[in-house]
Image: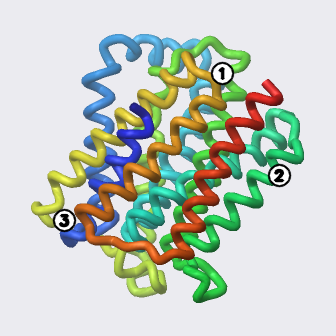
Amino acid sequence: MFSTFWALQIFTAKLGFNAGAVVLPFQLMLVLSAMLTLAILLLPRSGAELGSLFKRQPGIFWQLFLANGIQAGVGTGLSIIGIALTEAINAGFLVKLASVSTILFAWLLLKERLTGLKMAVAFTMLLGMYLLTTKGERLLPQTGDLLILGACVCWSLGNVLVRRILKTQAVSADAVTMQKPVSSLPVYAILVGLSIAYPGKLGSLQPVLQCCTFSPTSLPYALASGICLALAWIYLYRTLRLASASYMTLMSMVTPILVSVLALVFLGERLVWIQVGGAGLILLSGVLVYLSDVVNG
């Protein structure tokens, strides 16, 4: 379910941008939609726990808030901007690069073993990313692709920090999830402030970071994308409680496949053969991550 809702979030966001949505107002509506969804689904059961955590363990509360701000605020913010600037298929596959950055941060922060197989995974995935985004025609990926790669780093860092905290603290997955949209609001406030304070000085990002017009026609897409994002967050942590990390890695490969099918059918996007090869390498690396965890688990 996590992979399905993540794919739908990417797809609905791209539909909104194709319909003319401006990124910053779209992001704000998306976050508010996610916040309302989580409030309806989780607040009755987990609101008291989150309030108790704030009162009794404020240090842990703010550590989780910072980790969620990196993951849900900076990470999601960069990914939404990246989706606006690249094709949906690219976005669907590039989000899997979080596997590479997770391996790195787990090694640095959680002292997990960095095996030769994991290093091979990282190299294979990075090669696939390069072929997918450059089509073999240029040296560097486009701006949108690079922003999604930055989002992957933030997702991995935030999630690893949350994992490190939860290894020593008894906090439910739903309580952590409820923090996510709230912790992202300061990030969007900073982006809006930069857009207002420095108009015309954001270079190639200026067209997508202009503020503050919102077209009513993009509202359904923002609401749908926010709902899908909230459900993806919920199922991410709930699934990790029931399934192994290796199983999650393998099943999350559904996300780029589903995004690609939707983009090919409904958005008219196309892939050249070198991109197909790059996408295949990314999928292969996901299987290698699974095998790596199984061998060492």
Check the image and report above or below for 174 versus 292: above
* Rendered image quadrant of residue 169: top right
- Where does the image place residue 258, in percent across and percent down from the top left? 38, 49
The local crowd at label 3, few if under 14, some if 14 to 19, many if 20 or more residues have their Cα within 10 Å, is some
Report the Cα–Cα distance between label 3 and label 2: 44 Å
**Which one is earlier in the sequence, the residue at label 3 or at label 2?**
2
Q: Percent from the top left, x then y, of residue 253?
A: 52, 44
Kind of residue indicated by mark 3: Phe
Amino acid type of the residue that numbered disc 1 sits on in the rendered structure:
Leu
Q: Between 190 and 295, which is closer to the camera in this rendering? A: 295
| Residue 243 x, y percent position in the rendering | 58, 21
How far apart are the alpha carbons under marks 2 and 1? 27 Å
Q: Quadrant of the rendered structure where residue 245 is?
A: top right
Quadrant of the image containing the N terminus: top left
Mark 3 and mark 1 lie on one chain; the one further toward the N terminus is 1
- For the residues bearing labels 3 and 2, Cβ distance under 8 angstroms: no
Labels 3, 1: front one: 1
* Number of numbered callouts drawn: 3
* Horizontal side of residue 116 vs 143, given as left or right: right
Above or below residue 239? Residue 27 is below
Q: Mark 2 points at which residue?
A: 119
Q: Mark 3–mark 1 contact, CB under 8 Å?
A: no
Q: Mark 1 points at which residue?
A: 166
Task: For mark 2, give the secondary structure.
Answer: helix
Q: Judging from the image, what secondary structure is the residue with disc 3 in?
A: loop
Q: Read off the residue under disc 3.
A: 214
- What residue appears at the point 51 percent right and 58 percent down from the top-left corner? 93
